[in-house]
Image (cartoon, helix red, strand yellow):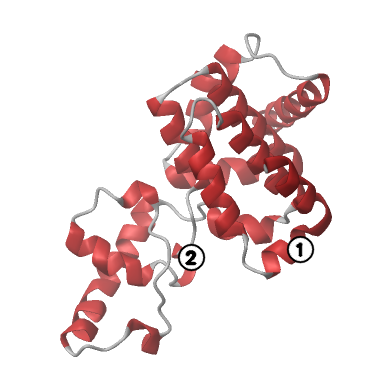
């Protein structure tokens, strides 16, 4: 099935974005990387999305603001949502809509999560945490396949959009996360990872771009 979806992405990525079908594909990715037997298929699917979908189509599924900024906006909006709830006013009346709650915020108290579900479409809060899914997979089962899939996706992202954009996206998850992952995931495992020749080129170009960015 993944090969069929990858082929469809190659030919009709704009149509998939326009039809709002990316959340469904990301749901498939989430299920696949949870399986040690099928996680490589999930990474292939995500790689295809990065290759063929424009960044503005994926932007809402990658972090653009830090968690501290989100919680600050939550604190500002909390009294308004509580006021609306007391009068049974639907948040949609204020242009707010219920969407996916970022995985990394599931540790919030239930009351705040209830409020946050109304806020995730407010301004820059709307995104799914692609990074969070991959990092959770690495934390729960740091297998060679998981590391290889993570490194290859990040390399594709760097090749396509540049190291500064990827650093901004990762550091929005946690300050200095980009540097931490380079030191603890990328560099220690590069020689041990076995990539196809074309994938080796992807990673080599990404490392060159990161090196040039670091020297700027």
Q: Quadrant of the N terminus?
A: top right
Most extreme residue toward the top, as rendered? 192
Location of residue 33 with respect to 160 vertically, above or below: above
Q: Pick the residue in front: 26 or 96.
A: 26
Q: What element carries label 1?
A: helix
In the image, what residue occupies the spot 73% across and 41% down? 3
Give coordinates of residue 206: x percent, y percent.
72, 30
Give coordinates of residue 27: x percent, y percent.
52, 51
Tag shown at residue 124: 2
Q: In which quarter of the image is residue 54?
A: bottom right
Residue receiving disc 1:
14
User: Would you say 186 lies left or right of 89 here?
Assistant: right
Q: In which quarter of the image is the C terminus?
A: top right
In the image, what residue occupies the spot 51% across and 27% down? 181
Q: What element carries label 2?
A: helix
Ranked by sequence position, the earlier of labels 1 and 2 is 1
* Mark 2 neighbour density, 10 Å: few (under 14) some (14–19) many (20 or more): some
Q: In which quarter of the image is residue 174?
A: top left
């Amino acid at each position: 099935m993944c090969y069929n979806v990858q082929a469809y992405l190659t030919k009709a990525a704009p149509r998939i974005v326009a039809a709002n079908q990316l959340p469904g594909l990301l749901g498939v990715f989430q299920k696949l990387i949870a399986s040690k037997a099928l996680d490589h298929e999930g990474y292939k699917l995500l790689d295809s999305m990065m290759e063929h979908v424009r960044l503005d189509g994926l932007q809402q599924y990658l972090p653009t603001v830090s968690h501290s900024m989100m919680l600050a906006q939550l604190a500002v909006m909390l009294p308004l949502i509580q006021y609306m709830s007391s009068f049974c006013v639907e948040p949609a009346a204020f242009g707010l809509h219920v969407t996916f709650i970022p995985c990394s915020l599931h540790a919030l108290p239930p009351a705040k999560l209830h409020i946050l579900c109304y806020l995730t479409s407010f301004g820059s809060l709307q995104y799914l945490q692609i990074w969070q899914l991959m990092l959770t997979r690495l934390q729960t089962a740091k297998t060679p396949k998981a590391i290889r899939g993570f490194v290859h996706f990040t390399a594709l992202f760097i090749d396509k959009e540049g190291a500064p954009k990827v650093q901004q996206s990762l550091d929005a998850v946690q300050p200095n996360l980009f540097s931490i992952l380079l030191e603890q995931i990328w560099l220690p495992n590069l020689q041990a990872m076995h990539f196809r020749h074309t994938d080796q080129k992807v990673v080599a170009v990404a490392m060159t771009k990161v090196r040039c960015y670091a020297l700027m």
